[in-house]
Amino acid sequence: MTPDTAHFDVRLALREADLLAAQRLRYRVFVEELGGDGPLIDHGRRLERDEFDPVNDHLVLIDTRRDECALDHVVGVYRLLRSDQAEAFGRFYCDGEYDLAPLRATGRRLLELGRSCVDPAYRGGTGMFLLWNALADYVLDHGIEVLFGVASFHGTEVEALKLPLSWLHHHHLAPEALRVRALPAGYQRMDLIPARELDRRAAMVAMPALIKAYLRLGGFVGEGAFLDHAFNTTDVCLLMDTAVMSDRHKGFYTRKHETRA
């Protein structure tokens, strides 16, 4: 283990302190930093939570130098919901924003990714890399075939987002078999600028880092964005088919699997 990662641990949240610390981190990011809100958010205890938390797996990045008793030790989190878990619960989180019928019709093993965030002090470092490594293990362990989830632009002023949204629509629209569509209640068309008028560099500068990361791995987006006014975000549904992901990233997954075998 290198010095850069020696003080990190990545695990599923199996203890109450891990889940509470994950919810505390989500509160700092989604509520205090980005201005979101929701009916089950506990402002008194500074916990961002919802009805899906009890049925999800929570992948947490731990800084072992930080205080667990103060719920300060979780510095990164990914919320994971497999199709078998969603079926038992009755729905995915994304069902509230997108028509997921095309995904369900495939009959393939699905994994919904959500509530991804990293403490500001750890962004741009090794934290997200460690989370993605652990996610790769999870995908292999559960035979996941399609990953999906909403990723967000801050704010709901579409005029300010028309460049990156248009780029996603014209260059990264999901194939028909996986093309989920935003629900009418929050639907926002994304083809706001003709393809010939788009500037790739400017579009990438305006694109959130998480979305760019998915695109580099061969990710697609569903049709239409969803305006989430409660969370003050404009959401797009990102999808990744592990069968057609880039050879480079598929090799990364395969090497990890072979190393662990």
Image (cartoon, helix red, strand yellow):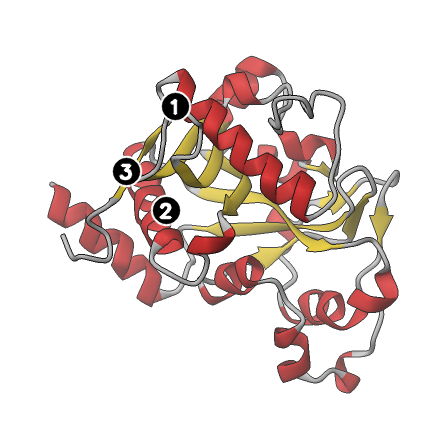
Residue tagged 2: 131
Helix, strand or loop status at disc 1: loop
Helix, strand or loop status at disc 3: loop
- Residue at 42 percent of width and 16 percent of height: 16
Residue type at the position of mark 1: Cys
The crowd level at tag 1 (other Cα within 10 Å; few <14, some 14-19, many 20+) is: few
Helix, strand or loop status at disc 2: helix
Q: Which mark is residue 64?
A: 3
* 220 or 115, nearer to the observer: 115
* 63 or 92, nearer to the observer: 63
Nearest to N terminus: mark 2 or mark 1: 1
Residue tagged 1: 69
Q: Nearer the viewer, mark 3 or mark 1?
A: 1
Q: Tell me the CA gap for discs 2 and 1.
A: 23 Å
Q: Is residue 193 above or below residue 212?
A: below
Residue type at the position of mark 2: Leu
* 44 or 82, nearer to the observer: 44
Q: How many marks?
A: 3
Nearest to N terminus: mark 3 or mark 1: 3
Residue 111: percent from left, percent from top = 48, 36
- Residue at 46 percent of width and 29 percent of height: 21
